[in-house]
Image (tube, rainbow, N blue to C red):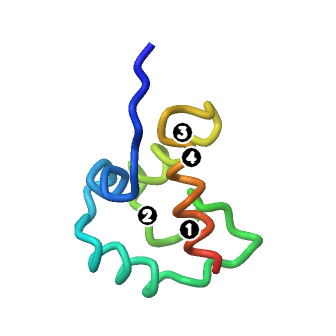
Amino acid sequence: METSAHNLRNLFEQLGLPAEPADIERFVSTHRPLADAVALADAPFWSRAQAQFLREEIAEDADWAEVVDQLNLMLRA
């Protein structure tokens, strides 16, 4: 079983987004606040592939689920 510790930088890289700390802050501030009624994966700023990845990781409670949850909380703050 693979046990890898993922972080926000890794997640942004996985999503094909700029992943420097300033890039992550800019992304969050640009897209926050995400309405409570909108699931993270359904947000309009994701590509189809990004949304599918996020949806699958949460549904399967996979490796990335914890950091995806972290991003979700950051976008709702």
- The residue located at (55%, 38%) in the rendering is 56
Q: Position of residue 36 (x, y in %)?
A: 75, 73
Residue bearing mark 1? 43
Instruction: Tell me how far mark 4 sits from mark 3, CA to CA.
Output: 9 Å
- Mark in front: 1 vs 4: 4
Determine the residue located farthest toward the right in the rendered image: 37
Q: Position of residue 18 (x, y in %)?
A: 23, 67
Give the mark nearest the N terminus, 1 or 4.
Answer: 1
To which quarter of the image does residue 38 belong? bottom right
Circle on res. 46: 2
Q: Amino acid at mark 3?
A: Glu
Give the mark nearest the N terminus, 3 or 1.
Answer: 1
Quarter of the image with the N terminus is top left
Q: Position of residue 75 (x, y in %)?
A: 56, 74
Q: Is residue 43 left or right of residue 27?
A: right
Circle on res. 57: 3
Residue bearing mark 4? 66
- Mark in front: 4 vs 3: 4
* Tag 1–tag 2 contact (CB < 8 Å): yes
Circle 1 crowding by C-alpha within 10 Å: few under 14, some 14–19, many from 20: few
* Tag 1–tag 4 contact (CB < 8 Å): no
Q: Is residue 47 left or right of residue 23?
A: right
Q: Amino acid at mark 2?
A: Trp
